[in-house]
Image: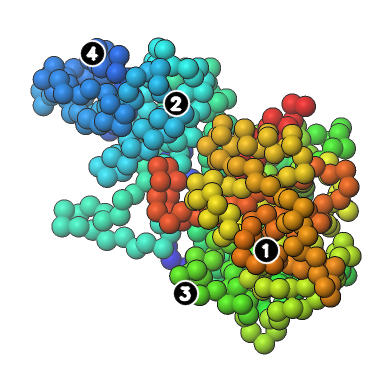
Amino acid sequence: MLSRFFSSSSSLTAHRMVQQRVQGQVSLLAKALSTPTTRVVFVSRSAASDLQSSLPFPVSAAALRDFKAKPQEKLYLYPSVDDKAFKDQRVLLVGLGDADKVTPNVLRDATHAALSVLKAKRAKDVVVQVPNLEGCKMDDSRVVELLSQASMLSNYQFDQYLTDSKDAYGDSKLRLPLEQIYLDASAEFQKNVGEQATVGEETIFARNLGNERSHIANPAFMEEVARASADLPNMSVRVLQQEDLEKEGMNMFLSVGQAGVCPPRLVILEYRGNPDSDKKVALVGKGITFDTGGLNLKPTGAIEDMHTDMCGSAAVLGAVRAASRQGLKVNIVCALALAENAIGSKAVKPLTIVKSHKGITVENNNTDAEGRLVLGDAMSYVQKEYKPKKIIDVATLTGACMIALGEHCAGVFSNSDELAKKLQETGTECHERCWRLPILPEHTAALKGSQSDSRSTGRGRYGGASTAAAFLQQFVYEGVDWAHLDIAGPSNYSAAKSYFPKGATGFGVQLLYTYLKEHEQH
C-alpha cells in the first residue's frame, strides 16, 4: 500500500488519486440487503413514545424505556437471541431533540455521532433511515441532502500511510471507514442523493490533496492531477510552465518559486458548460505546495503543516470537477497558481523589486507573504486572456484572518456588495461559513511604496488580512466583480470538529459549487 506514495512517477500517483474510489459512497436503498447491516434510526422527541414502529425487529419495552431522544443521544439495539430472521441486523437509535428545533447542524452532528459509533463497532454496510420530522422547518428533500452530505464526509479519514495490524482477537487495529452507506428514502430523491454524493466525493478529493505530503504533492503532481481531471465532460487544460511565465512577465509568481526543486507553473482548466454564452466565472486558487516562509523563515510550530498551503487550489479544482460531473450550465476558468516557497541560494531576497504581469512594480517586504504574489499575477493573466465577468480567488492567505475569525469561518473581501452577500448567504446554507471584512482606504494607502509602486505588505502588525486583500485588489481589472476568500482558518483543523476532520477539510468546494449552481440560473 505504501509503495505508491513513494513511486518516482508523480504522474502515476496523480492518476490513481483522481481515479480512487471513495469509501462509504452514499446511494439510495433500492432493495432489502441480504448482508449483515446496521440501520440508523433518527428519532425526534415526539416520536420517542412510539419507537417500535420505526424498528425492523421487535424490541422489548424495557430496552427502550430510558431513551429520551435528546440531541445526539444514542442507543444500540440487538434483536432477540430467538429471532433468527434478524440475527445479523442491528439498530442504532440517535436522538434529534424537538422536531421544530432540528436545524441543518443538528442533523449533521447527529449523523456524525452515529457514524462514529458504527466505525468503532467495525460496521461495514449501513442503512440510514430518513426520519419523519413532523413540525420540522426543513422539507424532505433538504433532509435527504443533509443526511447524504454528512454521511459521506463523516466517514472520511486520511489513512493511506497507516499500516494495518491485528489485535489479539484477529480484528484490525485501525478504525476503518464504512464500505457502503444507503439512504432509505423515496426514489424521487435520487437526484438529490446523487448530487450530494458528487459534491461529497469532490470535497474528499480536495481533502486528500490537502493532506498529501509535499514530497508527493508538488507543482508537477498538481499539474498531473489537473490533466487527469481534464478527462471530465467539457473540460480542457493548458499549462504555463516556467518559461511561459517568463514570457508573460509574471515576475511576482516566478520570484516565489525560483528556489523550489520543482519549477512553478500556472495550470488552467476550462469548463464550457454553456457554450452558447460568452460569460465566464474565474476561480483562482493559491497552490503553494510547501511554504517555508522563504528567507523570512517560519519558526517551529508554524511550519509543520505547510503542505496544506495549497488548499485554495484544491478547493477550486474540486469545485470545477463537481460542476463538470453535474453538468452545470456555466462557463468556468479554474486557475491553479502552483509553486514551492523554498529556501536556498536562489531564494528571493527581502526588498527585491519586481515588475508584475499587470505592470505594477512590487517590493517584496516579507518573503512569507508569498501567496498574494502568485495570486496577483495569476489573476491578472486570467482576466487579460479569458475576460471573465466575475473572479473569485481562494487562498490560505493570512494568519491575521484566522486571528480575526477563528478556525471555523473564512474571510470574504469584495468590490461587489452583491457578490459578497451571495457568497456569505451560500456559505451559511452549506455550512462553509464566511464573513465579509473591509478594505478601507487606509489599508490601500498602507501599501504605497517609496521605491516601488506597491509594497507587498502593509506597514505595521495590524489589519493584515485587509492589507493582503487590498494588495490583490490592485490586480482586479475594471468592470470585473471580484471576491477574495481567505480560508486560512477553516481549510485545516488542528482537531476534528463534527464531520470536519483534523487536517485538511476541503473547505470551499461546497461553497463554490453551490454558488456556481445558483449562478447558472441567472
> At 40% across and 30% down in the image, what residue appears?
106
Q: Which quadrant holds the C terminus?
A: top right
Q: Is residue 292 above or below residue 163?
A: below
Task: Find residue 16 and report its image quarter.
Answer: bottom right
Q: Which mark is residue 300?
A: 3
Residue 452, percent from left and from top: 84, 72
Q: Is residue 106 visible?
A: yes
Distance between the Cα atoms at labels 3 and 2? 41 Å
Amino acid type at image mark 4: Ser
Q: Which mark is residue 5?
A: none
What secondary structure is marked by label 4?
A: helix
What residue is shown at x 70% (from left), y 79% (from top)?
350
**Between discs 1 and 2, the one toward the N terminus:** 2
* Amino acid type, label 3: Thr
| Nearer the camera: disc 4 or disc 1 | 1
The residue identified by callout 4 is: 49
> Residue at the spot x=50%, y=68% of the render?
302
Separation of residues labelled 3 and 1 (CA atoms): 20 Å
Residue shown at the point (54%, 45%) measured from the top left: 409
Q: Which residue is mark 2?
A: 103
Looking at the rendered image, the disc whose residue lies closer to the viewer, 4 or 3, is 3
In the rendered view, would you say 158 is above or below 425?
A: below
Residue 355 sits in quarter: bottom right
Pick whichever, 191 or 467, lies toward us.
Answer: 467
Mark 4 or mark 1, earlier in chain: 4
Alpha carbon distance from label 4 to label 1: 57 Å
Lower position in the chain sequence, tag 2 or tag 4: 4
Report the quarter where the N terminus lies: bottom left
Name the residue carrying label 1.
Answer: 371
Residue 493: give x, y in percent of width and height: 46, 54
